[in-house]
Image: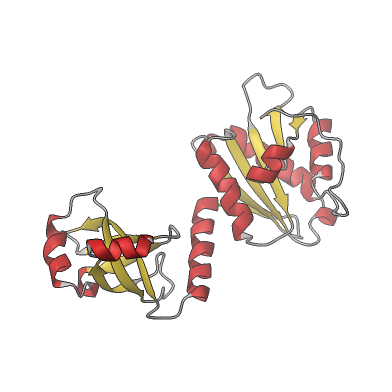
Amino acid sequence: MNGAPSDGSCAGDRVDITKPFKDFFEKRGCRIDVDETYRDRYNIDFGVSRVEGVHAAINLGIHVTLESDNYGQQEVLLEAARKGVVSKSVYVELCANSLDAGCVPIAYAACLSFIFDRRYQHAKTVGLRIFEDSSFHFFDLEENVRRLRKDLHDAAHDITTKLHGNIIAYFADKGFGFIEEAEAQKFFFHIANVVDEKLRLRLPAYVQGESIPVYFAYGGSEGKKYPKAVDVVVLEDEDVEAVED
């Protein structure tokens, strides 16, 4: 990540909560890079490209927020990780009084741990929550985004809401599979939830990687990892064209 060193400026009237972090990292011998394009497009507030005393290449992106479980911010940073915009990224989520409770050194130590600890060597991105009592924990950002997406979907749809998507996986030996809706939300379905006789006969011969367009009803989530699809029927060619239009 390239960019000019941070000057600690504010955006409009909004206080730059990242300034204490950038200042602390720089005082510890880190090179801090700020790129407005990366910040606006990928939620990367600043990057760390060098740590004093370390010769290995470092490309860490950091986002700092006071908002709890902000789906949009987390999804954008996760997308940056998927695209390889930075080698690693940390989503730092603070409580209201964390800045006054000495959270900056904690964030610094946690970021170094994420970079150098072998337990995280294969991880591209991670969430970091810092609490008012200065305790913290890492969390799986991808899993959290999946949970938030499901919660948003549950809030937006009533039971039996009609949806459409594509069967993207089916395991004939277990009798269940997954449907991906247009908004990229995955749904679990069981063969017992398929009401289309043609589809019931077709599924045992399903080939992994095949995509079958279907209509289905939202069957709730019941606290499960994926919401449930019921009343699943195959979309005929003319129905697919109508949906696409």
Rendered view: 95 above or below 161: above
Rendered view: 120 above or below 130: above
Image quadrant containing the N terminus: top right
Relative placement, left or right, of 199 versus 126 is: left
Q: How is the image coloured?
A: secondary structure
Q: Position of residue 163 (x, y in %)?
A: 37, 70
Relative placement, left or right, of 216 versus 79 is: left
The reply to whether residue 6 is visible in this rendering is: yes
Q: Position of residue 37 (x, y in %)?
A: 69, 38
Q: Residue furthest top?
A: 55
The reply to whether residue 140 is visible in this rendering is: no
Q: How many marks?
A: 0
Rendered view: 236 above or below 102: below
* Residue pictured at 63% horizontal, 61% vertical: 69
Image quadrant containing the C terminus: bottom left
Report the front residue among 75 and 245.
Answer: 245
Quadrant of res 61: top right
* Residue pictured at 87% horizontal, 42% vertical: 9
Quadrant of res 148: bottom right
Quadrant of res 117: top right
Q: Position of residue 115 (x, y in %)?
A: 61, 34
* Residue pictured at 82% horizontal, 55% vertical: 101
Q: Position of residue 151 (x, y in %)?
A: 51, 69
Q: Residue furthest bottom?
A: 159
Rendered view: 71 above or below 126: below
Relative placement, left or right, of 181 versus 90 is: left
